[in-house]
Amino acid sequence: MTMEEVLVREYRAGVEECVHTGHICGVDESGSAKYSVGDTEAVTFLRSSGKPFQAIPVVKHGADDTFGFTEAEGAILIGSHRAEPFHVEALESIMRKTDIQENLLICHPTYPISVYATEQLQRDHQPKRPIYHNCSGKHLGILALCKATGYPLEGYGSPDHPAQQEILETLAYLADLKKEDIALGTDGCGFPVFAMPLRSLATAFLKLACPDLIGDAAIRLAVEKIVRRMNAHYEMVAGTDRICSSLLMDDNIVAKGGAKGVYCFGLKKERLAFALKVLDGSEDEWPIIVASILEQIGYPNQDTINRMYELAPLDIMNDNRLVVGQNKPVFHLKTTN
């Protein structure tokens, strides 16, 4: 088994302070690993990088159209939102249109991930709410699917619920796996979460970027709609100054990250997709790693690369905005075919 490799080293005053190891897999349309760092077969949980696939049954069955969701509301079904005010406005609109009561959501009441949004709510003495949970768009999407198809609302997060079974089958189809080969756990929001090799995850993201590779017409049309919404309303997929939103500004890219260091993106024109895992679970290094991947493959849109370095500068600043260290991406993509 191939061992993990060092992806990023952090230095302070020339002294190495942190080392982030992991794996990277890049696939082309042949389905094989074209680029690799570490082990392309390393198994990881998708966490929220699975949200585009979890939204496919919602769109495939037309629940978004049944309830008249706007394009932005359709995008937040895929999002790991920060519960900024424009996110909350879209979520509350979805609840009104579907007549879904907030107490049906199984995600735990919380304050927004956005520090600014939380501070404002606390100044206004407002309580925690389930829709502030960053997965609430996904939950509302599945509840809308249940209402549109007649699936039971009760137990909508259970692995044996018909909506969850359809999600599993769809993901397996796009990843070129048998559903029995996908390991299941429980995500932080209460939904089933899937584990698979990075190569399979990259393969699934390649299908998002290149839906012509999808044989099933209904799934292909749903994917086209989902990806269009992710690019057009990138702010709904994450939020202000977040990597997913910054990458999705580039219409050539479809991207989504998940907790504990997993990140995935597909390139439409290049017909490539990458899945990576930072083994210590850190997300801070994602923009640096993605920028380095794009540079190493000769990606032509420098503005996209620059946005990554704006999110995670190579120079480490202290609280007084003085340069006190450096982040250094040190991996080299190996070409495997």
Image: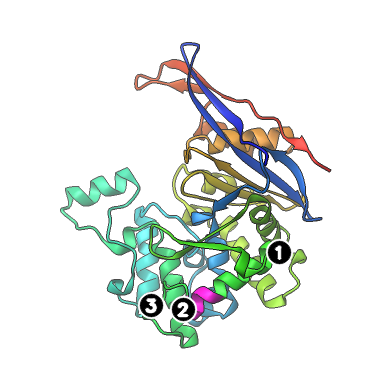
47 with respect to 178 (left or right) = left
- Do we see residue 267 in this rendering? yes
CA distance separating discs 1 and 3? 28 Å
**Crowdedness of circle 2 by 10 Å Cα count: few (<14), some, many (20+)?**
some
In the image, residue 216 above or below residue 278: below
**Residue 164 counted in the magenta span:** yes
Residue farthest front in this picture: 1
Mark 2: secondary structure: loop
Q: Position of residue 134 (x, y in %)?
A: 39, 56
Q: Earlier in the sequence, mark 1 or mark 3?
A: 3
User: Would you name the residue on which mark 3 appears?
Assistant: 155
Quadrant into which the N terminus falls: top right
Do the numbered discs 3 and 2 sit on residues whose CB atoms are within 8 Å? yes
Query: Where is residue 253 shown, x and y percent of the image?
Result: 65, 50
Are circles 2 and 1 on residues that touch, CB within 8 Å? no
Mark 3 / mark 2, whichever is N-terminal: 3
In the image, which disc is placed on residue 161? 2
Residue at 59% from the left image edge and 63% from the top image edge: 182
Task: Give the residue type that dot 1 points to.
Answer: Asp
Residue 176: assigned label: 1
10 Å crowding of disc 3: few (<14), some (14-19), many (20+): some
| Left or right side of 121 for 241 | right
**Magenta span covers which residues?**
160-165
Q: Residue at x 68, y 65 (%)?
A: 177
Vertical relation: 44 (above or below) 16: below
Residue at 48% over, 73% down:
69
The type of colouring in the image is rainbow
User: Quarter-wise, where is residue 333 in the image?
Assistant: top right
Location of residue 236 in the rendering, given as x and y in whole percent from the top left corner: 47, 56
